[in-house]
Image (cartoon, grey):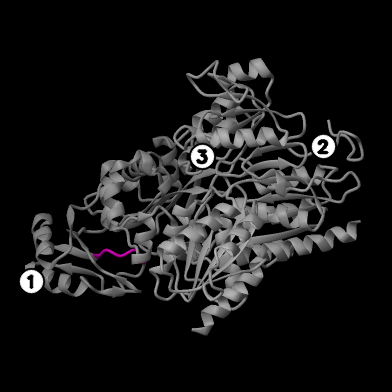
């Protein structure tokens, strides 16, 4: 399925120029705003879904009642879920049931119990569906596909000559920061994945690192983590055993006090676990260059890249 | 949101988990009333969200009204590790034969619910984990399968809970699991879970953390909100709908996005300063939000400089700039602003700030996060 990165149709991870996207909640404020921006970027936004609004259209994009009917009519293979927290779990599962292989959910504020149930349901009943999020900025493969809330203009397209960098991040704004800094340094990005800051993300660091490792278009990887949980430590383990591409990283929250949620539902240091220091140590031990702020992580990446080229 | 013990017990009771008869009191007279209702002897327990209450003298036994008066008077207003006791929980004292431990949390790495059960309760579970990790039974539960009484029973046997307590503890686990899931808890913990000489089991303590994201389906949580321990700045921020956490430094922080806000704290720290707060204004901030944010920062008398760190994604630099100009007209700021504006429409934003003619002693712009942090820390140190 993957072609050589020197080939004309270069690939990216999870999405590419052929990805056909429906927007669940296209008639809502968030869905409309970001869905249309995604289309303006060049993403193939082929349909919208809002129950009870079949036949309407949003700037030329047809609305369907169900994901099933939208998929049947358009052949969509990805969904962008932009609905309120109450409706998000059902919307994600509806997309999975309709056979959609890649679901991006930007919704912030989904209860952790719901996330855990959705994840377990996907795993048991719809193993072919990958969920990104909830509470994530989405995914962008510069020049090919942008699903979510990232401003496309801050991302530099990958070059056929390379080297290109893959980005995976738990934070939205820090993802943009990384995209922007790489662009300023003239470094192309293969794919940038925001996995989100919630306790049960559908896609993990490890999932993304595995994809980047086998993606011929990605030559180096930046990872941006934050306090809370053990996802970064698990990533460090995976890097030690499976990732040969050079990496830099940044972990937000060195100064975060214990027991306080720093904005994200998943960002909390509790019982001495999930500290930034522990995560940085684990990543360093795995051979990752760790910056003490986002700029430093990108400077480290610039050095890595200069050695590749 | 963390609940106080008494709230946790009330929450447990909703799910049929047995707790001692008792009530909460904010005064000595109330405590005596609650004690009479619960029947002597009673235990008077300080309601603070911090460990080590017993050692600090915050838990006392009382056999009559005089003893309640004495202890309640001492405990109310007591300072336990910086937490002032506003309420006591007065409950009927229980005879204890054995003490166990039980809790449910989400294991984020396994993406499953996690039961932890131990026959060694009444002490810190971290301590048990250190001294004798085999004494803790851990069971992962698939959230879509739930916990059956049979599975609970197996864990109880495995944890070597006394034979006569096994049925009671297993039934309690199923109820606690229901409280954890249907009650939308991040943590539901009973320590100790006691066996009484008469064979009954019940929850002698309650530690409950609720998932704030689930508040929309729990109107009953409103009363817990009312007693949440917030400082004046945090209260004001909540009224204005901002994500704010008070800290004790002198550099006020405003950033868009939780990650960037955390990172801003880190960078300030890195260049030798200390942040006064965490404040995330979120995406798409307008003049209204910026004014509210500056209001909250301005209410903090320790703030000597304000670092506004914005990376425009959906948030547009020109909107942020308009917001700051507007806010500065409405609010008289006690400290100078250092702003770093990058990303979408950043140059338009900087142009708006420049054209507003704001004096350099009140607002300066820096091109990078690091330079802005240095300036903010320097300004904070000057006064």
Boundaries of the magenta span: B46-50
- Circles 1 and 2: CB atoms closer than 8 Å: no
**Magenta-highlighted stretch: main secondary structure?**
loop
- Examine the image and state in which quarter residue B347 appears: bottom right
Q: Residue at x 88, y 40 (%)?
A: A5
The chain carrying label 1 is B
Residue A6 sits inside the magenta stretch: no
Q: Position of residue A299 (x, y in %)?
A: 77, 64
Nearer mark to the viewer, of 2 and 3: 2
Which residue is identified by label 3? Answer: A115
- The chain that hosts pointer 3 is A
Instruction: Please tell me whether mark 2 sits on a helix, a strand or a loop.
Output: loop
Residue B349's place in the image compared with A136, above or below, is below
Q: Is residue A4 above or below residue B55?
A: above
Viewer-side residue, A95 vs A58: A58
C-alpha distance separating marks 3 and 1: 52 Å
Classify residue B164 as left or right of residue B290: left
Residue closest to the far bottom: B382
Considering only order in the chain, which callout, 3 or 2, is on the residue closer to the N terminus?
A: 2
Task: Pinpoint the chain carrying mark 2.
Answer: A
Residue B66, numbered circle = 1
SS of the residue at dot 1? helix
Q: Residue at x 59, y 78 (%)?
A: B272
Say whether residue B263 is visible.
no
Report if the CB atoms under discs 3 and 1 are less than 8 Å apart: no
**Closest to the observer, A99 or B68:** A99
Judge from the rendering whether residue A117 lies leftward or rightward of residue B16; answer left or right.
right
Q: Residue at x 56, y 74 (%)?
A: B360
Q: Label 1 neighbourhood size at 10 Å, few (<14), some (14-19), many (20+)?
A: few
Task: Name the one closer to the observer, B132 or B267.
Answer: B267
Which residue carries the number 2 mark? Answer: A11
């Amino acid at each position: 399925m993957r072609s050589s990165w020197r080939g004309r149709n270069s690939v990216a991870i999870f999405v590419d120029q052929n990805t056909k996207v429906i927007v669940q909640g296209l008639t809502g404020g968030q869905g409309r705003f970001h869905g249309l921006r995604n289309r303006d970027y060049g993403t193939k936004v082929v349909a919208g879904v809002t129950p009870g609004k079949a036949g309407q259209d949003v700037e030329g994009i047809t609305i369907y009642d169900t994901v099933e009917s939208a998929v049947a009519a358009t052949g969509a293979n990805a969904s962008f879920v932009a609905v309120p927290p109450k409706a998000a779990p059902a919307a994600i599962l509806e997309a999975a049931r309709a056979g959609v292989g890649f679901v991006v959910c930007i919704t912030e504020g989904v209860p952790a119990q719901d996330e855990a149930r959705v994840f377990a349901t996907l795993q048991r009943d719809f193993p072919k569906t990958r969920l990104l999020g909830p509470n994530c900025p989405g995914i962008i493969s510069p020049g090919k596909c942008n699903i979510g809330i990232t401003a496309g203009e801050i991302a530099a397209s990958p070059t056929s000559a390379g080297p290109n960098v893959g980005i995976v991040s738990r934070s939205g704004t820090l993802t943009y920061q990384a995209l922007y800094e790489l662009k300023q340094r003239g470094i192309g990005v293969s794919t940038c994945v925001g996995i989100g800051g919630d306790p049960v993300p559908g896609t993990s660091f490890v999932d993304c690192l595995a994809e980047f490792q086998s993606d011929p278009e990605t030559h180096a990887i930046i990872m941006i983590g934050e306090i809370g949980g053990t996802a970064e430590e698990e990533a460090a383990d995976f890097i030690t055993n499976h990732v040969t591409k050079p990496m830099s990283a940044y972990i937000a929250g060195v100064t975060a006090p214990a027991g306080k949620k720093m904005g994200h539902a998943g960002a909390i240091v509790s019982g001495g676990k999930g500290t930034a220091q522990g995560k940085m140590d684990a990543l360093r031990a795995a051979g990752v260059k760790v910056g003490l702020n986002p700029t430093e992580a990108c400077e480290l990446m610039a050095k890595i890249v200069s050695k590749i080229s | 949101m963390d609940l106080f013990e008494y709230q946790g017990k009330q929450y447990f009771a909703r799910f049929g988990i047995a707790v001692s008869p008792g009530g909460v009191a904010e005064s000595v007279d109330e405590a005596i009333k609650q004690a009479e209702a619960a029947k002597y002897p009673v235990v008077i327990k300080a309601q603070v969200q911090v460990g080590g209450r017993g050692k600090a003298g915050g838990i006392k036994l009382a056999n009559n009204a005089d003893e309640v008066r004495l202890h309640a008077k001492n405990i109310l207003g007591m300072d336990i590790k910086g937490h002032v006791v506003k309420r006591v929980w007065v409950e009927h004292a229980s005879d204890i034969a054995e003490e166990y431990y039980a809790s449910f949390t989400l294991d984020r790495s396994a993406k499953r619910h996690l039961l932890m059960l131990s026959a060694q309760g009444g002490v810190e579970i971290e301590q048990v984990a250190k001294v004798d990790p085999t004494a803790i039974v851990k069971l992962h539960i698939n959230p879509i399968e739930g916990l059956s009484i049979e599975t609970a029973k197996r864990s109880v046997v495995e944890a070597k809970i006394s034979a006569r307590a096994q049925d009671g503890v297993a039934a309690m686990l199923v109820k606690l699991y229901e409280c954890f899931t249907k009650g939308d808890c991040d943590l539901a913990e009973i320590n100790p879970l006691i066996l009484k000489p008469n064979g009954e089991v019940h929850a002698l303590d309650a530690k409950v953390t609720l998932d704030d994201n689930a508040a929309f389906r729990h109107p009953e949580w409103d009363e817990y909100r009312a007693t949440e321990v917030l400082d004046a700045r945090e209260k004001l921020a909540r009224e204005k709908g901002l994500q704010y956490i008070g800290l004790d430094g002198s550099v006020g922080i405003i950033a868009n996005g939780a990650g960037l806000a955390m990172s801003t704290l880190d960078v300030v720290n890195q260049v030798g300063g200390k942040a006064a707060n965490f404040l995330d204004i979120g995406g798409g901030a307008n003049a209204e939000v910026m004014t509210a944010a500056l209001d909250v920062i301005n209410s903090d008398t320790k703030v000597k400089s304000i670092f506004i760190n914005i990376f425009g994604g959906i948030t547009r630099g020109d909107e942020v700039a308009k917001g700051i100009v507007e806010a500065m007209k409405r609010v008289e700021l006690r400290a100078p602003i250092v702003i770093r504006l990058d990303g979408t429409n950043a140059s338009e934003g900087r142009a708006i700030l420049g054209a507003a003619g704001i004096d350099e002693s009140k607002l300066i712009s820096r091109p990078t996060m690091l330079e802005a942090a240095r300036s903010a820390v320097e300004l904070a140190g000057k006064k």
